[in-house]
Amino acid sequence: MSDALSTSMFWAGALLALTPIVIGGIAVLAWWHTHKRPGRAAQGSGAAPTAPDREGQGQYGDTHRGTSEREGAPR
């Protein structure tokens, strides 16, 4: 019973079943990659964890030295 219709229906079902798993895995890997800490590898080697220099930086590392956050005018 391996005619062309059976084979095509098998591959259609396999794609329907595996596509959400693959897309979910990609989403989880992308989330993990964006949320991992940069000093995590050094912590496992016994070294003291180092904190990045974050003075004057926002959440995503952008600096706001040229403008005031409230007025938008230069400081």
Image (cartoon, grey):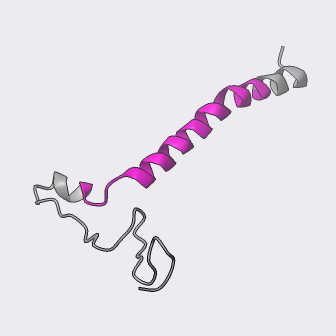
Query: Which part of the image, by quadrant, shows the N terminus?
Result: top right
Q: How many marks?
A: 0
Q: Main secondary structure of the magenta part?
A: helix
* Depth order, front residue of 20/37: 37
Residue at horizontal 75%, vertical 24%?
A: 13
Q: Is residue 24 left or right of residue 51?
A: right
Picture quadrant where residue 68 is located: bottom left
Residue at horizontal 89%, vertical 25%?
A: 4
Picture quadrant where residue 41 is located: bottom left
Task: Residue 55 in the image: state x and y as whole percent.
Answer: 27, 72
Task: Residue 26 in the image: state x and y as whole percent.
Answer: 55, 44
Was residue 44 drawn as part of the magenta stretch in this picture?
no
* Depth order, front residue of 70/21: 70
- Asked if 42 appears above or below 2 in the picture, the reply is below
Query: Which part of the image, by quadrant, shows the C terminus?
Result: bottom left
Task: Residue 11 in the image: state x and y as whole percent.
Answer: 76, 28
Q: Farthest residue toward the front?
A: 71
Residue at horizontal 51%, vertical 77%?
A: 72
Residue at horizontal 11%, vertical 60%?
A: 47
* Depth order, front residue of 69/21: 69
- Asked if 5 appears above or below 40 in the picture, the reply is above
Was residue 16 drawn as part of the magenta stretch in this picture?
yes
Task: Residue 5 in the image: state x and y as whole percent.
Answer: 89, 22
- Asked if 41 appears above or below 55 in the picture, the reply is above
Magenta segment boundaries in residue numbering = 11-40
